[in-house]
Image (tube, rainbow, N blue to C red):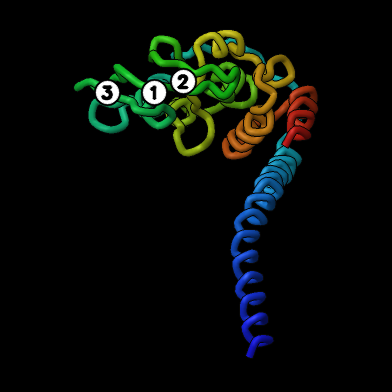
């Protein structure tokens, strides 16, 4: 009887220790799973990039933002595309009757800034309109250019700090990269996803820069 009780106590202790160990094991194995997801995203991006045509950029002649107008089209009631993106990307966003954000908090992934006023944020076209023009959008219809400028289904529109948006301008990844290196992987995969969807071509230097950023994934 005494041996039976000792066995039961040992079995109970093992069960308790197992329950304590399992959550710790789960926590320890979480980072590799996340890393694998980034690797898979990078692999898909490399595959899409390999399918893009490599060519010299087209002339900027004839370009103007007006060719993509209205690049902040009305979407729902009085809300424009820009206002919808600000509401999507922010936290605790409050809007007035005209749908304009009057309060909220935004995080700029380009430079890591936390912004507490709409005055300090911009909605960036990840692939700039002028850059898209020289990558093939010059040959598009006005309707397709408008759809590109207002695309909220692809990763083309992103809320960032005004200062980062100004620094980026119409530059491509061969000339500008987010100051925050932690965003290079997402930036490159977003850029490639947009260009693949719209069948925009890339330059050789652009392709090299994108592949270098994908190494951070």
* SS of the residue under disc 3: strand
Residue pointed to by mark 1: 82
The reply to whether residue 44 is visible in this rendering is no
Q: State which quadrant residue 38 falls in.
A: top right
Question: Horizontal and vertical percent for residue 125?
Answer: 52, 22
The answer to whether mark 2 and mark 1 are in CB contact below 8 A is yes
Q: Where is the N terminus found, in terms of image quarters?
A: bottom right
The answer to whether mark 1 and mark 3 are in CB contact below 8 A is no
Residue pointed to by mark 2: 123
Q: Which sits in the foreground, 114 or 77?
A: 114
Q: Report, in whole angstroms, how far the alpha carbon at label 3 lies from the one at label 2.
A: 16 Å
**Mark 3 or 2 closer to N-term?**
3
The reply to whether residue 105 is visible in this rendering is yes
Q: Please, which residue is most extreme toward the front here?
A: 2
The answer to whether mark 3 and mark 2 are in CB contact below 8 A is no
Task: Identify which residue is drawn at 61% across, 37% down.
Answer: 193
Residue pointed to by mark 3: 95
**Mark 1 or 3 closer to N-term?**
1
Which of the two marks, 3 or 2, is nearer to us in this view? 3
**Within 10 angstroms of label 1, few (less than 14), some, or many (20 or more) residues?**
many
Question: Horizontal and vertical percent for residue 139?
Answer: 57, 26
Question: Horizontal and vertical percent for residue 109?
Answer: 57, 24
Look at the picture and state if 116 lies above or below 10. above
Q: Is residue 103 left or right of residue 34?
A: left
């Amino acid at each position: 009887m005494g041996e039976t009780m000792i066995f039961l106590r040992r079995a109970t202790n093992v069960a308790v220790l197992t329950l304590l160990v399992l959550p710790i094991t789960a926590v320890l194995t979480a980072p590799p799973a996340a890393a694998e997801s980034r690797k898979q995203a990078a692999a898909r991006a490399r595959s899409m990039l390999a399918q893009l045509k490599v060519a010299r950029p087209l002339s900027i002649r004839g370009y103007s933002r007006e060719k993509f107008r209205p690049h902040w089209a009305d979407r729902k009631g009085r809300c424009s595309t820009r206002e919808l993106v600000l509401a999507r990307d922010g936290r605790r966003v409050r809007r007035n009757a005209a749908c304009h954000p009057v309060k909220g908090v935004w995080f700029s992934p380009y430079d890591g800034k936390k912004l507490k006023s709409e005055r300090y944020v911009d909605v960036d076209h990840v692939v700039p309109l002028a850059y898209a023009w020289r990558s093939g959008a010059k040959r598009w219809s006005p309707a397709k250019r408008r759809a590109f400028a207002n695309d909220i289904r692809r990763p083309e529109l992103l809320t960032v700090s005004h200062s980062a948006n100004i620094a980026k301008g119409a530059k491509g990844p061969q000339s500008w990269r987010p100051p925050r290196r932690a965003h290079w992987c997402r930036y490159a995969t977003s850029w490639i996803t947009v260009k693949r969807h719209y069948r925009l071509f890339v330059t050789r230097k652009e392709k090299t820069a994108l592949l270098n950023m994908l190494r951070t994934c």
